[in-house]
Image (cartoon, coloured by chain):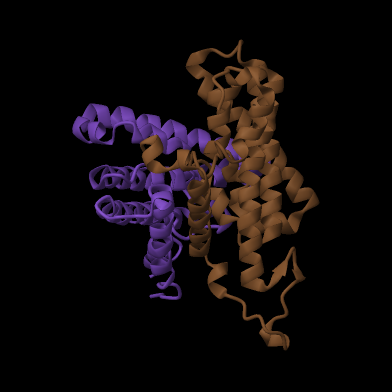
Chain colours: A purple, B brown
Amino acid sequence: MDLVNIVFRAIFVENLALNFLLGMCTYIAVSQRVTTAIGLAIAITLVQTITVPLNYLLYEYLLGPGALDWLGLGGFDLTFLRFVTFIGIIAAFVQILELALERYAPRLQHALGIYLPLLTVNCAILGASLFMVQRNYGFVESAAYGFGSGAGWGLAIILFATIRERIRESEVPAGLRGLGIAFVVTGLLALGFAGLRGIEF
Amino acid sequence: MASLPQQDRPPRVFVDPLIETNPITLRVLGLCSALAVTSSLVPALIMSAAVIAVLSFANVAVSLLRHVMPPSIRLIIEVTLIATAVIVVDEVLKAFAPDVSSVLSVFVGLIITNCIVLARVESFAMHNGVWASLLDALGNGLGYSWILVLIGAIRELLGFGSLLGYKVLPLASTGGWFEPNRLMLLTPSAFFILAVLVWWIRERRPAQRKDAQGR
């Protein structure tokens, strides 16, 4: 039940995009079309589900306080290296994922196009790994959290893209067109998600 | 704007990013942190200082190294430089302002993936001298900061009735007239305030409108 809670919270209550406002740049830039939004949602869920537990292992056995016990070096605390390590792991994994997709699923890779490499600089992904450390998740929990936070971010961008496709047909005041109305819509979406706060299983 | 190239006119490099080419309202960069840390004024101020510090360091360092960096691995070098600066800022904050550091939580670390930094490094510092790069970093940093500080001030004033922790509006709960608006403490309010801000800027600067720039 704990795992269900973690996934549910990550998707709805603590949605990375709408509650913590992470990955906003990509969120605003890549939500012009529903199809690309869906592709990006799949990619980010995949990347999160794998990088968060991977970073957990690194943190637990290399970086955290006392993590080097197994080498007999219990006194070291390399926590300050976590930023560089995590971003390196994420960049490397995105690169590997791109190569693997190219080899085994060229159609999906083609559909994702440029958005796949861009995931490296998406702060939602680094953010999820940092939250994982901050909340002391275990291995299975961090995998669940990775999946939930990725899926939540994906859900947010798909919802936003569907609304945005409709907005194109409507009359918006000139100064508000584009970025302005995008913020208003996101704010309303965030209000809706905030309403789910407090639900637990 | 004059047709002179940017590097010939240092003042413009500094002044333009404040409104004309503001990183947040025009270029839509660095939004993640801009919205998340602005629930009150103090974290907004500290975050602004952190971003200005990291941006200045990264711009100057990349500008110095721009002739010796092999193009094929320049992104990795840039990200590593930025991450190094962020680690220093994070450790300094933990040492001298632990309270603020815990409020900002993961958002200091997320300066690494703040697109403003990488965008300025890639598009400006790679092609310009050290002095101009420093000015560009300060200009963009301040352009980012004033929006952060303004949103932080509005949210703290309407959400708590205070500024920088000092009571400004007398609260209804203590016999005053002001009823704090709890919505201001939630993230959606940041979106609404930023939307109004963008709207206001674009009404005054029609060149920044969507139709004018085709996006």
Residue A90 at x, y percent in the picture: 46, 37
Q: Which part of the image, by quadrant, shows the C terminus of chain A?
A: bottom left
Residue A108 at x, y percent in the picture: 22, 36
Decide: is B168 above or below B77: below
Q: Nearer the viewer, residue A7 or A198?
A: A198
Residue A143 at x, y percent in the picture: 41, 52
Does residue A40 appear to the left or right of B40 in the view shown?
A: left
Image quadrant assignment for residue A63:
top right
Decide: is B191 above or below B208: below
Residue at the right extreme?
Answer: B96
Image quadrant assignment for residue A33:
top left
Q: Which part of the image, by quadrant, shows the N terminus of chain A?
A: bottom left
Instruction: Give the residue displayed 73% in from the left and 80% down from the top.
Output: B170
Instruction: Give the residue displayed 24% in from the left and 52% down from the top.
Output: A169
Decide: is A67 above or below A91: below
Q: Nearer the viewer, residue B96 or A17?
A: A17
Does residue B162 appear to the left or right of A156 in the view shown?
A: right
Q: Is residue B58 visible?
A: no
Q: Nearer the viewer, residue B85 or A100?
A: B85
